[in-house]
């Protein structure tokens, strides 16, 4: 009998201790962060599904169309070059000699043209003089006909000499074109991004269907844009001319204003990836892309719709089912409340019904133990 009594007393003590722990835990306030419901702008946006890239508007990866030994390489990586400047040259002394020969042939044929045309002009004047004398009976028919024939022959010789000049000029153009194939010329003002090759090395053109590194890669850094993939579900809402925000990992704390300049006319189907549509976004202000480098990781947020002066809350405060925890200052408790929402993005959500300006709601909804009616204490964020 005494043993049963002891067991009963121990069980009672355990139950009282457990009840005390339960009530102490139950009534302990949960620290939460609050924010005030305010008015402001709310936008509905679409963002890229995978990381985008900052690209140069103009970029040329140049390679020679002929193989040979590198004879001149006047540029190096990082150099600023001008349009028309020689960047790379293969040994071409034989082709230069052909160009010089062509120049000499043009001079020679031009001299022959002048000679032939001067003689033709003299023969023409002589024929006219004899024709006049023939009309007055002071010259024979034979001498007049001979002069006229010589005039026609001289004219034909002049025309042949002119044609020879054209042939020599065409040969010269062919020689210059062959020489041009040994050179890489800057197609625009830009910066040398990469050089593959050294003086004296041999280079060969890329075989058909096989991509090889370019000999010289030139980039125009004065114009940059962002290319980014958009999910095919969101793509139909995007149009050229829409406003967007540009975000770069290299400039984490900054947003740059942009405008959609192009939406790809087809869906990109890549194996094992969601189907996407590529878009291109320009910087609205050119000064924003100063000191930026092509190749930076970039994201874009295209603004589809916008409401100004709307009642809004942080999107992070929303629970499933469009519910929020509203703070009651009189009892230091929170209550679960369903709201009707409008436009939304990752930062703010528009509230159409359910909340009033000035009310305070919980933003730290991931705290353990939060529920309708629990006691909380305000924690500074």
Image (cartoon, grey):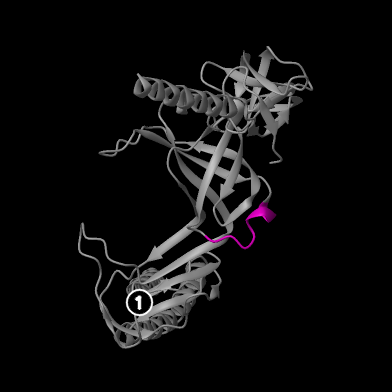
Tell me if residue 288 is in the magenta stretch. Answer: yes
Judge whether 105 appears above or below 361 on screen. below
Quadrant (top left/top right/bottom left/bottom right) for the N terminus: top left
- Residue 298 pos. (x, y %): 52, 49
Q: Measured from the top left, where is residue 22 in percent x and y?
A: 53, 25
Q: For the C terminus, which image quadrant?
A: top right
Rendered position, 338 above or below 281: above
The quarter of the picture where residue 35 lies is top right
Judged left or right of residue 286, residue 45 is left
Residue placed most toward the observer, 349 or 117: 349
Residue most extreme to the front: 1
The segment highlighted magenta reads 286-293
Say which residue label 1 marks: 179
Direction from residue 142 to residue 27 in the image, left or right: right
Looking at the picture, tell me which residue is in the foreground, 31 or 19: 19
**Picture quarter containing residue 203?**
bottom left
Residue at figure coordinates x 62%, y 21% from the top left:
374
* Residue found at x 65% / y 33%: 32
């Amino acid at each position: 009998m005494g043993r049963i009594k002891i067991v009963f007393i121990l069980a009672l003590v355990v139950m009282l201790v457990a009840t005390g722990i339960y009530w102490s835990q139950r009534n302990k306030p949960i620290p939460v962060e609050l924010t005030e419901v305010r008015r402001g702008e709310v936008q509905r946006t679409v963002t890229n599904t995978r990381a985008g890239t900052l690209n140069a508007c103009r970029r040329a990866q140049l390679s020679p169309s002929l193989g040979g030994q590198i004879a001149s390489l006047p540029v190096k990586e990082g150099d600023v070059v001008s349009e028309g400047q020689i960047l790379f040259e293969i040994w071409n002394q034989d082709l230069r000699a052909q160009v010089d020969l062509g120049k000499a042939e043009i001079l020679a044929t031009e001299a022959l043209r002048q000679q032939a045309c001067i003689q033709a002009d003299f023969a023409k004047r002589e024929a006219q003089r004899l024709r006049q004398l023939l009309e007055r009976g002071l010259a024979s028919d034979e001498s007049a006909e001979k002069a006229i024939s010589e005039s026609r022959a001289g004219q034909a010789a002049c025309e042949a000499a002119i044609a020879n000049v054209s042939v020599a000029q065409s040969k010269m153009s062919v020689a210059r074109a062959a020489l041009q194939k040994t050179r890489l010329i800057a197609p625009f003002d830009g910066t040398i991004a990469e050089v593959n090759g050294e003086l004296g090395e041999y280079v060969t053109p890329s075989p058909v269907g096989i991509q090889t590194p370019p000999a010289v890669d030139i980039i125009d850094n004065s114009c940059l844009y962002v290319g980014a993939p958009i999910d095919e579900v969101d793509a139909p809402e995007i149009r050229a001319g829409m406003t967007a925000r540009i975000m770069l990992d290299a400039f984490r704390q900054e947003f740059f204003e942009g405008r959609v300049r192009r939406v790809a006319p087809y869906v990109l189907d890549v194996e094992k990836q969601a189907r996407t549509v590529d878009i291109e976004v320009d910087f609205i202000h050119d000064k924003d892309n100063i000191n930026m480098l092509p190749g930076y990781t970039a994201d874009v947020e295209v603004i589809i719709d916008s409401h100004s002066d709307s009642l809004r809350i942080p999107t992070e405060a929303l629970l499933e089912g469009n519910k929020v925890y509203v703070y009651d200052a009189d009892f230091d408790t929170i209550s679960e409340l369903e709201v009707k929402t409008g436009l939304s993005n990752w930062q703010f959500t528009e509230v159409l019904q359910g909340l009033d300006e000035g009310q305070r709601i919980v933003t730290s909804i991931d705290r353990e133990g939060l529920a309708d009616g629990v006691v909380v204490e305000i924690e500074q964020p």
